[in-house]
Image (cartoon, rainbow, N blue to C red):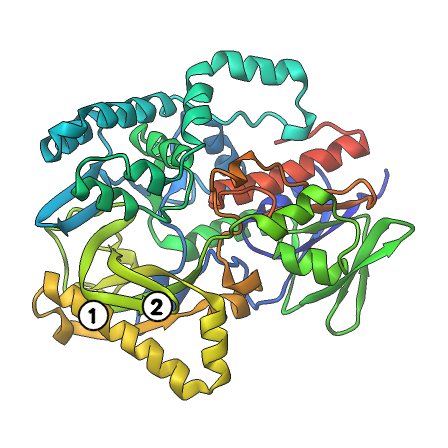
Amino acid sequence: MDKPKKLNIIGGGVAGLSAGIYARLNGFDTTIFESNPTAGGVCTSWNNEGYYVNGSIHWLVGSAPGIDFYDMWNDLGVINDNKFHYHTCLMECKNIDGVDVHFYLDSVKLKRHLLEISPLDAGLISEFIDGIRIMSKANLRMERAFELLHAWDWSKTFIGHFPEVEILGKFNQLSIREFAKKFKSEILRKAFESIWSPDMSMGFFLIHMGYAISGVTGYPLGGSGKFTASLVKRYIDLGGKFRFKQKVSKILITKNQAIGIQTEDGNKHHCDYVISACDGHTVLFKMLEGNYSDEITKNAYRYLKTYPSLYYFSAGVNRQFKTLNPAIIGLNLPLLNSLKVGDFEHKRVSFQIYNFDPTLSPTGKTLITAMLDTNYDFWKNLLATGFDKYNSEKNRINEELLQCLEMEFHGISELVEFSDSSTPITFEKWTGNHKGSYEGWLPTPQSTKSKISNHFKDLSNFYMSGHWVIPGGGLPSAAFSGREVIDLICMKEGQEFLP
């Protein structure tokens, strides 16, 4: 019997774990090299004063049958190992010029609510709701890696999903901000601009609203930590191996073929294939020293926008919020004064109040988090002046966020048991992501047209996976990219890909 081909995977986040699991399902010998002492990457949790801070996951597209992502998560061991909570709202916007805006996950209820706010925007509201309803029928086919699909496969996709293709063709040209400006209502303009990053493609937003309304986007109770534990268990049960605290410094190449990796301790680990599942900038411009990548990929790193770096706030409070309607993005509140976080100015902030997940906090208490866009260079320069100024700025921001919560929930300040925050420097240190960007390429109208390569013609036996090869980020994209490279390796090896 032939000895199984050996794969070395750089990075133990969701993309690396997915690649490892699918590699084991297809008979490959795999080792994941992870720089941290645990797996998960961005998708992680940590303990603070008895609260388990959910560092990443808001929802899981494909948590229920109806789309192919469900089958992928089933392969990866996530479905049977997790219980899911299904929200009834995408986001709750409180007090926009005295009006509350609810992004209900019921298209009839949502349309009625938006029309009550602004009857003058009836035409645009109908266009928005029609787009959501059409996209709720969309399903990304996952039988093969995109590269292996033939012209007839694409033709069937377009013919079978012409309404969805038409909607995406129209709305992918617009950012959320550009769409929001079309509203006559200032209230609706502000509400739409509060959803994620307003520079995102409107088509991307409609896809995810469609998924949410169709009931296939549940939140896994236990958050990022438990979710990652499911993937790790599946990988280990299949015989996969880890090498923790092993930071990769170089990809070994002979005659334009990847033959292994070198870790920072100087050790070389030879293999038949190398899969990168970590920061793309580090891989391309440090590990590969700027060689081999094609012009499309180079242009992506020159011109495409990345997700803004994050300031991630967390707090534990000694109270419950039983009457609060939870939402996927959370509760969007106005700040008393504009809040500067680095060079970004925020007038509103979305808080995720985990009253729907009691597993994250001690009995009778609640975890609260918030994600605010910021910029890496500000925090890097501030840290260079010393930890005192760096920590002082964090404390200032945290205090203003707690004041914002106090305006909505009077007396909450006295019930705070801890407050903490992570900056882009924290994200960079933990994940290695370039400038602390947590999800790679922002799904802007420009990036949604880009097809970024996951392998290069001048370098054989090397593949890339993760957020740097699929614009838009998110858990499904990361996991699918890992699945895709194993499909390509199976093709090269002349064997059938087994999901």
**9 sits to left or right of 122:** right
Q: Residues within 10 Å of mark 2 (few under 14, many from 20)?
A: many
Tell me the residue at 68%/38% (across/down). Answer: 486
| Quarter of the picture holding the N terminus | top right
Task: Give me the residue at 24% from left, 59% from top.
Answer: 347
**Residue matched to label 1:** 402
- SS of the residue under disc 1: helix
- The picture quadrant where one finds residue 270 is bottom right
Question: How far apart are the alpha carbons under marks 1 and 2?
Answer: 15 Å
On the rendered structure, is 401 left or right of 264? left
Pointer 1 and pointer 2: residues touching (CB < 8 Å)? no
Q: Is residue 388 above or below residue 106?
A: below
- Horizontal side, residue 418 vs residue 202: left or right: left
Amino acid tagged 2: Val
The residue singled out by tag 2 in the image is: 341
The disc, 1 or 2, on the residue closer to the chain's N-terminal end is 2
